[in-house]
Image: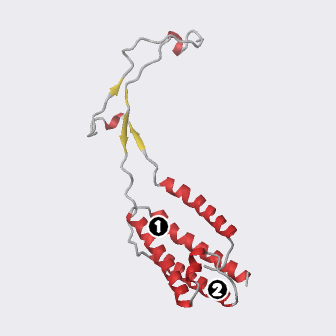
Amino acid sequence: MAIFSYRRLLRAFVTASIIWGPLSLIAQQASIRVTSTDLRENSPVPVETASLASLPAAPSAIPVESGSLWSTGAAPMVEMAIVAAPVRPAEPSVHRFWDRQNRVLFAATAGMATVDFFVTRANLRSGGKELNPVTRVFSGSTPALAANFALETTGVIGLSYVFHKTGHHKLERATSFVNIGSSAGAVVYGLTHR
């Protein structure tokens, strides 16, 4: 990555946590469907029918006008079935890992890492100092710095693959977007602080 301050690193971390926090909650939503009485005959799950018709009427604490439907103190009872059946989650849109969108995202990730490498190398050659502690380990030589950015791109692809295999397809795509954004920010910062 290009040279940047710890304040910007902290801001990027907070921004990423704001973006990733809600995304992780989306995958954890449960859905329950309440079906009507039409499903009683076709339901493989036993349906329990509840009717309040045999219960005595409860006294009404609300003053009621005489002659109204509710003046008898008892509400008309209707038999209804309440069935809470767990709904199978919709089948996720199955896509191949190396589909067109991932190929474009991974190419953009590799492209931004390449630009970041050249900007970082130019800044280091002109006397700049690498502020990223992970990249600083590799900033001693050009091949080591190139290996750092190649490993970064490989790590993004690997993490996206893990998200793909575990069914977190939004996070699969978001991994590349976050890396592209952070690399672009580092490039802009490196170019403006030469």
Q: CA distance from mark 2 to mark 1?
A: 27 Å
How packed mark 2 is, by other alpha carbons closer than 10 Å (few <14, some 14-19, many 20 or more), is many
Which of the numbered marks, if any, corresponds to residue 17? none
Across and down, in percent, residue 150 comes to 50, 82
Q: Up-down: is 129 above or below 19?
A: below
* Amino acid tagged 2: Val
Q: Up-down: is 166 above or below 85?
A: below
Read off the residue under disc 2: 119
| Horizontal arrangement in the rendering, residue 89 relative to residue 13 (left or right) | left
Across and down, in percent, residue 87 comes to 37, 46
Query: Looking at the rendering, in which quadrant would you find the N terminus?
Result: bottom right
Residue at coordinates 51% horizontally, 69% vertically from top-left? 175
Residue at coordinates 63% horizontally, 61% vertically from top-left? 14
Mark 1: which secondary structure?
Answer: helix
- Nearest the viewer among 128 and 22 is 128
* Amino acid tagged 1: Glu
Mark closest to the chain's N terminus, 2 or 1 = 2
Which of the numbered marks, if any, corresponds to residue 172? 1
Across and down, in percent, residue 189 comes to 69, 78
How packed mark 1 is, by other alpha carbons closer than 10 Å (few <14, some 14-19, many 20 or more), is many
Query: Looking at the rendering, in which quadrant would you find the C terminus?
Result: bottom right
Residue at coordinates 58% horizontally, 84% vertically from top-left? 139
Across and down, in percent, residue 147 comes to 50, 84
- Nearest the viewer among 94 and 131 is 131
From the image, state whether disc 2 or disc 1 is nearer to you.
2
